[in-house]
Structures are given as structure tokens and as C-alpha cells.
């Protein structure tokens, strides 16, 4: 892992890992989480890896450990309306920067999954969740918290089954859009209807 060299020299050095979730979703927000951790923080949590490689149950367990151990984290979202207004690239950058800004202290190292940010001397890593545990932990926090948003929407959205698909373009979700049209939570800038 990329952080090993840093922590071999100084295990107290703080690293901020950052990741976003919901970028390719048809509906709902794009969200990001950042975690600020040192070597000793991560020793308190087992099983950290890319959120997509963990079951929902295991993601939730790790998130509970984040809370129990008072791991410092931040979470931000931009709504589908903001995505439509400003574009997915701009809103992606905004949620990443906002989460880092909440936590950043001078001389912290910042690692971001895949996305290039010009602030904070942030380092963009390809497959960051596989190469950096702080990014992997951020991906878990982001996924858990965004999933909660999508699972707790009002009953009027039940026809789209957001509880299960979290807004992503599953076959069932596409069929619901064909049948019911798009809702006020769908991203109109994604031109969903012509592509179905």
C-alpha cells in the first residue's frame, strides 16, 4: 500500500483518503467521504478494502468501527439538480474538495481515488481503493452514507426500487423509467429516456 512508506518513517503522520460514490448513478446525489487517519487509527479496523468488494453487512460493520473509534471523517453530497446545473465533473470535484476542506491540516498527505484535484497537494491514484487503505476506508464511509440516503426516500419513489438499486441503472430500474418516466430525483442531464 502506498501509505506504508510514509508510516514506516512516521506512524503518526496523518493521511487523508478521499473517494466519491454515485457518479454513474441515474438518480440521487453524487457523494464523497474523506477520512483522516494515521497508522494507529487503521490498526483498530480489520477488513478494509474497496467498498465494491465488501457485502453491505461488512461495510456497515466497518462503518460502525469508524464511529466507535472516533475516526475523523467528512461526508458531502451534491443533489441531482446540482449535477444537472453544473455537470458531473464540477459536482464530483466539489464534493471531494468539500470533504477534504473539513479535515485538512497543513502538511497532511491527501490521496484521492482517480480524480485530479489541484488543491491540498492531493495525489490522484489509479485504483486508489486497491492501493491505499485510507481511500478504501473513505469509499466504505461514502457508500454506507449515500446508500442510507437512497434507502430512506419517501414512499412515492418506491416504483423505482431505489432501496435496492440505490439509483443505479439496473434492468429493473430502466424498466421502471420506461413505465413511469423520470422522477424529480433523476438526473435529466444524463438523457436517460433516449438511451433506454
Image (cartoon, rainbow, N blue to C red):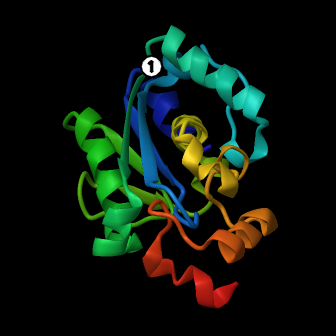
* Coordinates of residue 84 in the picture (x, y in percent): 36, 73
* Coordinates of residue 122 in the picture (x, y in percent): 34, 55
**Nearest the eye: 2 or 118:** 118
Is 76 on the left or on the right of 23, as rendered? left
Residue located 62% across and 43% down the image:
1
Is 26 on the left or on the right of 76, as rendered? right
Quadrant location of the C terminus? bottom right
**Nearest the eye: 180 or 139:** 180
Mark 1, residue position: 71
From this view, report whether residue 83 is shown above or below residue 48: below
Residue located 54% across and 57% down the image:
22
From this view, report whether residue 97 is shown above or below residue 59: below
* Coordinates of residue 89 in the picture (x, y in percent): 38, 72
Residue 63, can we see it? yes
Secondary structure, mark 1, is: loop
* Coordinates of residue 150 in the picture (x, y in percent): 56, 44
Is 178 on the left or on the right of 86, as rendered? right
Bin the neighbour count of mark 1 within 10 Å (Cα to Cα): few under 14, some 14-19, many 20 and up.
some
Amino acid at each position: 500500500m502506498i501509505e506504508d512508506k510514509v508510516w514506516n518513517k512516521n506512524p503518526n503522520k496523518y493521511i487523508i483518503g478521499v473517494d466519491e460514490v454515485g457518479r454513474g448513478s441515474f438518480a440521487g446525489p453524487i457523494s464523497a467521504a474523506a477520512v483522516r487517519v494515521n497508522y494507529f487509527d487503521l490498526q483498530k479496523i480489520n477488513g478494509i478494502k474497496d467498498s465494491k468488494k465488501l457485502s453491505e453487512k461488512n461495510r456497515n460493520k466497518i462503518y460502525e468501527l469508524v464511529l466507535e473509534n472516533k475516526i475523523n471523517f467528512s461526508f458531502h453530497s451534491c443533489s441531482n439538480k446540482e449535477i444537472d446545473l453544473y455537470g458531473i465533473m464540477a459536482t464530483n470535484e466539489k464534493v471531494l474538495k468539500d470533504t477534504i476542506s473539513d479535515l485538512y491540516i497543513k502538511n497532511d498527505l491527501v490521496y484521492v481515488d482517480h480524480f485530479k484535484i489541484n488543491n491540498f497537494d492531493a495525489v490522484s491514484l489509479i485504483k486508489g481503493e486497491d492501493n491505499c487503505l485510507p481511500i478504501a476506508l473513505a469509499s466504505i464511509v461514502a457508500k454506507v452514507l449515500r446508500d442510507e440516503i437512497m434507502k430512506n426516500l419517501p414512499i412515492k419513489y418506491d416504483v423505482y426500487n431505489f432501496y435496492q438499486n440505490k439509483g443505479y441503472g439496473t434492468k429493473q430500474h430502466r424498466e421502471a423509467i420506461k413505465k413511469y418516466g423520470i422522477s424529480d430525483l433523476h438526473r435529466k442531464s444524463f438523457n436517460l429516456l433516449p438511451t433506454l
